[in-house]
Amino acid sequence: MNKEPLLKQVLGTDWDKLSPVLRQHYDVPNAKTNRCVLTGTMEIDYPLFITPLIKIIRLFGGLIDIKGQQVSTQVEKWGEPDNAFLHWRRTMQTADGQQTIFASKMAYRAENELVELINLGFGLRLKVSEDNGDLLYQSNGHLLKLMGFCIPIPDWLVLGHATIREHALSDNNFRLEFVIRHPLCGETYRYGGVFEIKSDD
């Protein structure tokens, strides 16, 4: 049984270079009944022409199809006894009452790489690194698990290349920025916000 947090397994010695709030963010309990909870507000936006593809991705349970400023957000995270998976449940609600849930789980794939899985066998490979105390994710292609096969899907066949940066603001707050850019269409998706770690019990 591996008792180290999943992200520590992925980052290796670079884990210790992360800002303390980011290490706390990912040093999560390994039981569903004992969760780490974050709260914050998000800005979510994407161009109108990309809406049909966003709706298709939502059928797999991925991304967030609502738009808005000051979107109230709660993020719950928990691990498993062997730390094989890190589970996420993100609940967003706009000022006019629209609500959506984005659930996923992350798993170790290789040194400095993990995969984020959603429904129906669809996943996103992510290269993970530390950058001056920040945590940096960069997409490395998508995949589809189908009938025992793992089918690779290049980023450009979906929304493009994703970059996610988490930057510490204090001992208890950090900023998240998530941007997807396509080589032909430019920026196709963006969300970001400031989060506070509310609980680790």
Image (cartoon, helix red, strand yellow):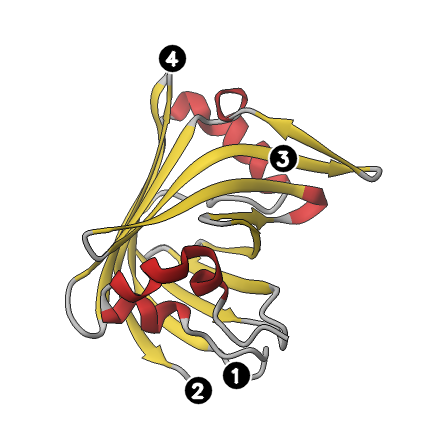
Q: Measure the C-alpha gap from mark 3 to mark 4.
A: 21 Å
From this viewpoint, which residue is outermost toward the front? 13
Counting other residues with Cα less than 10 Å from the Cα at mark 1, is it few (<14), some (14-19), or many (20 or more)?
some
Q: Measure the C-alpha gap from mark 2 to mark 4.
A: 45 Å
- Give the structural element (helix, strand or loop) at label 4: loop
The image shows residue 198, relative to residue 111, as above or below, that is: below
Kindly check if marks 1 and 4 are in contact, taking CB atoms under 8 A apart as contact. Answer: no
Kindly check if marks 2 and 1 are in contact, taking CB atoms under 8 A apart as contact. Answer: yes
Q: Give the mark, 2 or 1, whose residue is nearer the N terminus.
A: 1
- Give the structural element (helix, strand or loop) at label 2: loop
The image shows residue 172, relative to residue 186, as above or below, that is: below
- Give the structural element (helix, strand or loop) at label 3: strand
Q: Quadrant of the N terminus?
A: bottom right
Q: Hey, what amino acid is under mark 4?
A: Leu
Q: Nearer the viewer, residue 18 or 147?
A: 18
Q: Hey, what amino acid is under mark 1?
A: Asn
The residue positioned 34% from the left and 63% from the top of the image is 15
Q: Which mark is residue 201?
A: 2
Q: Measure the C-alpha gap from mark 2 to mark 1.
A: 5 Å
Q: Give the mark, 3 or 1, whose residue is nearer the N terminus.
A: 1
Percent position (x, y) of residue 28? Answer: 45, 75
Disc 1 target residue: 34
